Amino acid sequence: MKNRLRVLRAEREWSQADLAQRLEVSRQSVNAIETGKFDPSLPLAFKLARLFEISIEEIFSDDELRG
Amino acid sequence: MGPHVSSPARYRLEDRVLFIMVPMFFAFPIVLAIADHYHLRPISDVLAVVYAALASLPFIAAVVIFGLYMAEEKDEFQKSVFTQSLLWGIGATFAVTSFWGCMEQFGHARHMPVFWVQVVFSIAFVIATAANRWRYR
């Protein structure tokens, strides 16, 4: 699953640590999600969407649907 | 929670593991030393059961501690990494003990006391944890 987390974070000039603090997770979690090594659960995805004030689909995209 | 590696649940896990590490690694030798000191060898059936049960208690505690961590950890990624490390530890333990068991069966290796299983698991778990931390650094 691809995501725009790095871009969204950069737009707000947040470091991985800043985002981790806002999400109440470890920095490693943010890094793993950004690099696609870990797909977040639905609750965490919703939390990200609320934080960035956009929909989940605007953050994450399904590789298979894109072909 | 801050942006650090360890969550509060992780700190609690580390504290609890440190607390049981001493009995974990020294329970069996201590039990044998007590038996020797008080000239209790050969150990009677009842005493053997009591000593064996005492020596196994830290491992039951370890399972409880791991379970508590899985229940308390709010960071799903850290929980996933911990599960991976546990699986690597269990896999390595099965692989090493199966290999050694076969070698022993064919007469190509000396008998390995069962309590070494905990050492194999601990080493594999620590290596897997370090490897995962490096991978997701």
Image (cartoon, coloured by chain):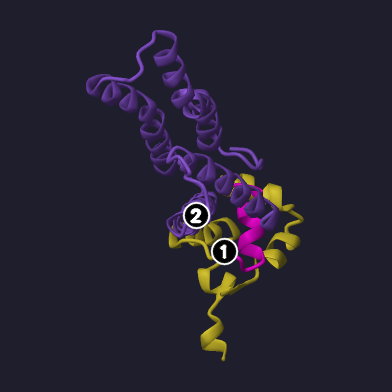
Tell which subunit mark 1 falls on. Answer: A
Which disc is residue B100 wearing?
A: 2
Chain painted in purple in the figure: B
Occupied quadrant, residue A3? bottom right
Instruction: Report the residue at 57% width, 56% height from top.
Output: A51
x then y, percent, for residue B65: 42, 34
The CA span between labels 1 and 2 is 36 Å
Q: Nearest the camera: A46 or B23?
A: B23
Quarter of the view holding residue A24: top right
Residue B103 belongs to magenta span: no
Question: Secondary structure under badge 1?
Answer: loop
Look at 70% across and 64% down and name the residue there: A6
Task: Specify few, some or many for label 1: CA neighbours under 10 Å numbering under 14, 14-19, or 20 or more.
Answer: some
Query: What chain does mark 2 sit on?
Result: B
Instruction: Say left or right for B43 vs A8.
Output: left
Q: Which chain is yellow?
A: A
Q: Nearer the viewer, residue B83 or A61?
A: B83
Q: Is residue B81 shown above or below B56?
A: below
Q: Residue at x 39, y 31 (%)?
A: B61
**Residue topped by disc 1:** A38
Residue A28 on the magenta span: yes
Query: Looking at the picture, which amino acid does disc 2 mark?
Result: Trp
Secondary structure beneath disc 2? helix
Which residue: 45% across, 58% down? B98
**Can you say whether A24 is above or below B52 in the image?**
below
Specify the farthest residue to the left: B46
Instruction: Write down the region rendered in magenta.
Output: A26-37
Residue type at mark 1?
Phe
